[in-house]
Amino acid sequence: MQSNAQNRNFEERVKILKQRIENISFEERSHLKELIKDINYRLELEAISKDSAQVLKQKAAEESAQNIKIRIAEIEQQLRDLIQNKVDEAIFKEETSHRFRFAGLDIDYSENYHHKHRYYNDNRRTQSQTILAVGTSNLITDGNLNSLENSDFDFWKSHFFEIGSNSKTRMFKNSGLFYINYGLSLTYNVLSPKRNQFFVANNTATLLQTNLENLDKSKFKTVQLVVPLFFETDFSRSKLNEDRIYYRPNTGFKMGFGGFFGLNIKTKQILKYQMDDIKVKDIKKGDFNVNNFLYGLNGFVGYRDTSLFFRYHLNNLFKDNLIEQKNIEFGLRFEL
């Protein structure tokens, strides 16, 4: 009840100040309108020239704008102070208030208040956010990083996209430097072979073959459910307020390194080409001898909510191939 009364009082005071600003603006505009009308009348009587009338109108408009600025300056300051007091009250209110965090938004459902900010006002050791990652994807052959230079896959057309939920827990109660970072993500991985090639699976291997027709599109897609785990170092500065330290993760530089494991839940290949002036779209779904269980290494380094990100699969993409082909992904990672 008290909170609702305070909110109503705040809204009423804001409304009053807003109305005062509108009244001042209306008065000055009305006065300017009369001045312009008088100048036009003098122009019609040829008491002043057209150029002089234009100069007088410009001067009147500038004086009117300056008058508005001067008259509302004090009211604007009152409005800013009122809003700032409201924000301060919300940020440093009692720790017993109820909150939850979704997609970077701190929502207080005890008093119907929500705001987005970059640090936690109650020093909880665990925070959650939504993760988005996007970048390029490719295959490393036989563990040789140089194989990317002569890759069978188009650099710009081969990519990955990841979306998921992520949490990070402060490892020590009185330090905001080290965190354990973990979550659950859905990853879409696309490989786009070059030179009219596409994947063909048989009983012994899954290999690239050249299509007889010119391919307009060749894409090999996998969908994966991934559990990432990082040991994170966050160099964000803490804040001291009222003799208490507030940790502010994701407001400075940070880096993390760790591993991941997951499952491949869907595989398909899409081919588009023309045959006898007929456009053909061929979609094949199956396992293509893809390893269903995946694991590997991942890491990031960044500032605030944006990081450079990599992921390297230690498992082979295909089960029975004689050569090792392992996914590697580079891109940007966003914590929302």
Image: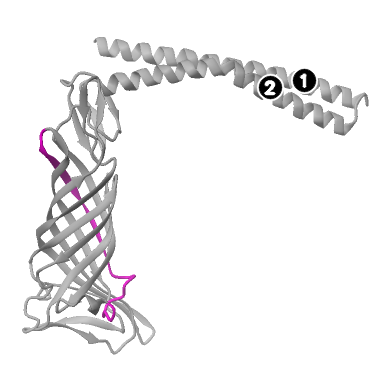
In this view, 156 is above or below 82: below
User: How many neighbours does mark 1 have within 10 angstroms: few (below 14), some (14-19), or many (20 or more)?
Assistant: some
Q: Is residue 34 left or right of residue 139?
A: right
Question: Which is nearer the eye, 86 or 284?
Answer: 86
The extreme bottom residue here reads 212
**SS of the residue under disc 2:** helix
Does the magenta portion include 191? no
Label 1 element class: helix
Q: Residue at x 15, y 36 (%)?
A: 175
Q: Residue at x 18, y 32 (%)?
A: 100
Q: How far across and down, in percent of the image, does residue 139 sit? A: 20, 74
Q: Looking at the picture, how far across and down is residue 77, in whole percent? A: 49, 18
Residue under the image location 15 percent in, 20 percent down: 96
Image: 24 above or below 121:
above
Query: Residue 169: within the magenta?
Result: yes
Q: Which sits in the foreground, 335 or 198?
A: 335
Q: CA distance from mark 1 to mark 2?
A: 10 Å
Cβ atoms under marks 1 and 2 closer than 8 Å:
yes
Q: Which mark is residue 64?
A: 2
The residue located at (11%, 75%) in the rendering is 318
Q: Position of residue 212 (x, y in %)?
A: 29, 90
Q: Is residue 28 left or right of residue 238?
A: right
Tag 1 residue: 35
Q: How is the image coloured?
A: one colour
Query: Compared with residue 203, is residue 130 higher up or lower down, i.e. above or below?
Result: above
Task: Tell me the magenta residue range.
Answer: 149-173
Q: Is residue 272 above or below residue 179?
A: below
Going from the N terminus, do you reach mark 1 or mark 2 first?
A: 1
Amino acid type assigned to the residue bearing label 1 in the image: Leu
